[in-house]
Amino acid sequence: MTRHPDDQQRRRAEDIALFRYALVREASDDQLSKRVRGQIVRELATTAHRGPDGTEITVSRPTIDRWIRAYRAGGFSALTPTARRVEPRTPAGLLALACDLRREDPSRTAAHIAEMLRVSHEWSPHPRTLQRHFRALGLNRAQLSANNVAFGRFEATRPNELWVGDALHGPIVGGKKAILFCFLDDHSRFVTAHRWTYSEDTLSAESALRRGILSRGLPDTVYLDNGSSFVSKQLLRALAILGVRLVHSRPGRPQGRGKIERFFRTVRDQFLVEVRDDLGSLEELERRFVAWVERVYHRRVHSETNETPLDRFSVLGPPQIPSMALVREAFLFSETRTVTKTATVSLFGNHYEVDQALIARRVELVFDPFDLERITVRYLDNDFGLAVPQKIGRHVHPMAKVAPPLGPPTGIDYLGLIEARHRSATGAPIGYARLKDTSNFSTTSLTTASTPVASTVGPTTEEHEGLQ
């Protein structure tokens, strides 16, 4: 969509004013003493802040003091920078031609378009000028062309370089179809993360991925298909915060997914074929799947690698586990809403009051999907505090459904024997949050890492408490 330059300048001026307001609003309180205000201003002057353009900047104390005086004298509007009028030096017709060249072939770089203009018109703007113009009009190459990458036949060179994820429809458990979300390390064929659930949604996919990250470490890239549970902006946000690259296979071209599909065939042929029809609960299915994965699959020599997945994955030693605070922030949900004229926003039928300076702004609402009463409001990466609940009809995200309690486990069979051996070898299940301490890393810690703490569709009690 083409944007008018005047609109761009106006929005930028408003964003600058909001940045300044977010910075000085606390220090502008008339009830603060000079000493307290001075402490706040000194702290602001020594802290790096994310500016309106996304880069980190520092603001001097005299500048902060000047903004405080301006806000006290003229309110929010006094923080808006004065518009500068600069006559463009590049002919409008030449810029329009550059845009047409970019639209004609999005793969053309700004440098190549500048060269084409020099050849045809004997002069061209600098490539950086063209880049800024393309960016302002939404004509970036990534926006005009398909930027998803599909992998061909290859193998990752080391553990945690690439995880491939997918979902498998399993047996009927407790009257409902069970679904397995699973992530496989491409290099070792090691099952890095999994969870049996009843819902094929983003919350279930994130729950499985979170468990894997807290026990196996961070992958460089996660490769997924285009299923609705994998294309959610919530998952994209989580991986972006963690610094993990997300790649989707192109529709109709599932290259690079052969390993996870082959693993699912093994699951069907060697595990699901032994699952009894009277299996009582997801918890029992999860226990037996963990036992089969750890005692059978991970310890069997793979036909292509000629190594066991366990030996091949653990060759680099203990994985690097991210901090619980970072994981908590990553797996919070985020929604964008436009603030109404009454300084309110709505979310899943609930209504909240926010800062009046955000009226007509499109803000980010960040929240735990299991607690819709506590919503953090952000604008341009600046924190504007908590939204004040006005009307709460829903307390959890629509996807946050907990599986109902079902029947007790059944008797001993093939999978039951494997489970018994697994528990006797590894002991009681342990929580993922405690796996961050890798000082005693061993084969045993790897084999127990994916043991489930519980088998609800959403996060387990222990994982959910980690989000608080």
Image: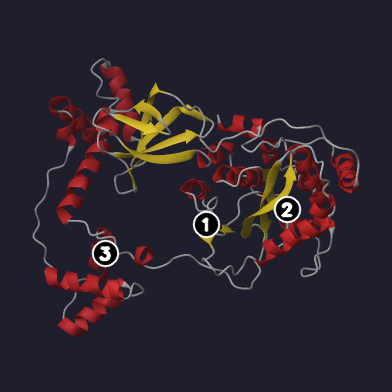
Instruction: Left or right? Give the position of 385 relative to 211.
Output: left
Residue located at (76% from left, 37% from top)? 281
The Cα–Cα distance between marks 2 and 3, rounded to whole angstroms, is 46 Å
Tag 2 residue? 317
Res 309 visible: no
Mark 1 residue element: strand
| Residue type (three-letter) at the residue carrying disc 3 | Phe
Task: In this rendered view, identify the residue nearer to me: 238 or 442.
Answer: 238
User: Residue 219 has which mark?
Assistant: none
Q: Position of residue 105 (x, y in %)?
A: 32, 75
| Residue type (three-letter) at the residue carrying disc 2 | Gly
Q: Report which quarter residue 48 is drawn in.
A: top left
User: Residue 134 has which mark?
Assistant: 3
The Cα–Cα distance between marks 2 and 1, rounded to whole angstroms, is 23 Å
Instruction: Left or right? Give the position of 184 relative to 40.
Output: right
Q: Nearer the viewer, mark 2 or mark 1?
A: 1
- First-in-chain label (2 vs 3): 3
- First-in-chain label (2 vs 1): 1
Q: Is residue 139 above or below residue 433?
A: below
Res 70 visible: yes
Mark 3 residue element: helix
Q: Position of residue 441 (x, y in %)?
A: 76, 45
User: Residue 245 has which mark?
Assistant: 1
Q: Quadrant of the N terminus?
A: bottom left
Task: In this rendered view, identify the residue nearer to me: 390 or 34.
Answer: 390
Task: In this rendered view, identify the residue nearer to me: 270 or 223.
Answer: 270
